[in-house]
Image: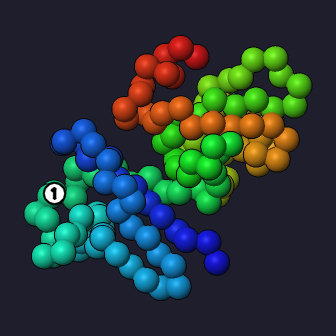
């Protein structure tokens, strides 16, 4: 069974809590879901007092890039597929809201299939940043 991991972007302090949650065989650590449905960061003494609305949660895809770096939604990646000459820049997204319950890249060069799967299998992918700390990487697209 693969671990299910999340990280959180703290919108107030502009930093990541990484990883904030890890589940494996039912073990939970470092995060609780508040009564409002939002995550609350927990330290060894209990709730940290941080407002849960200040956190944006991103899930681990279960995949790693060519350097062994874990790929999370919100990551910005450089990828090359098939016989492309130049690498492209894309964002990792979860498309569950659009009736496509999977992680994929956006934009997807292989519209009729999961581009992330194809790239992992037939090319290379490298995490070069994330949408919060490196938005300028997306402007270059």
User: Residue 113: x percent and y percent?
Assistant: 81, 44
Q: Which residue is mark 1?
A: 51
Q: Secondary structure at mark 1?
A: loop
Q: Does residue 94 appear anywhere in the picture? A: no
- Residue at position x 81%, y 32% in the image: 81
Q: Nearer the viewer, residue 51 or 127?
A: 127
User: Residue 58: x percent and y percent?
Assistant: 44, 52
Left of 27 or right of it: where is 34? left
User: Residue 117: x percent and y percent?
Assistant: 76, 48
Q: Nearer the viewer, residue 133 or 11?
A: 133
- Residue at position x 53%, y 14% in the image: 140
Please determine whether, in this image, residue 6 is positioned above or below residue 113: below
Give the quadrant of the C terminus: top right
- Residue at position x 51%, y 40% in the image: 75
Please determine whether, in this image, residue 4 is positioned above or below residue 59: below
Q: Quadrant of residue 123?
A: top right
User: Residue 139: x percent and y percent?
Assistant: 49, 16
Q: Does residue 12 appear anywhere in the picture? A: yes
């Amino acid at each position: 069974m693969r671990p299910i991991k999340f990280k959180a972007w703290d919108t107030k302090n502009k930093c990541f809590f990484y990883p904030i949650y890890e589940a494996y065989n039912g073990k939970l650590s470092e995060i609780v879901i508040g009564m409002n449905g939002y995550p609350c960061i927990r330290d060894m003494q209990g709730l940290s007092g941080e407002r849960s609305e200040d956190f944006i949660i991103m899930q681990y895809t279960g995949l790693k890039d060519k350097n062994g770096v874990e790929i999370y939604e919100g990551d910005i990646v450089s990828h090359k597929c098939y016989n492309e000459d130049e690498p492209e820049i894309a964002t990792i997204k979860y498309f569950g809201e659009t009736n496509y319950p999977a992680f994929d890249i956006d934009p997807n060069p292989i519209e009729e299939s999961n581009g992330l799967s194809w790239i992992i299998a037939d090319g290379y992918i490298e995490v070069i940043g994330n949408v919060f700390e490196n938005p300028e990487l997306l402007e270059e697209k």
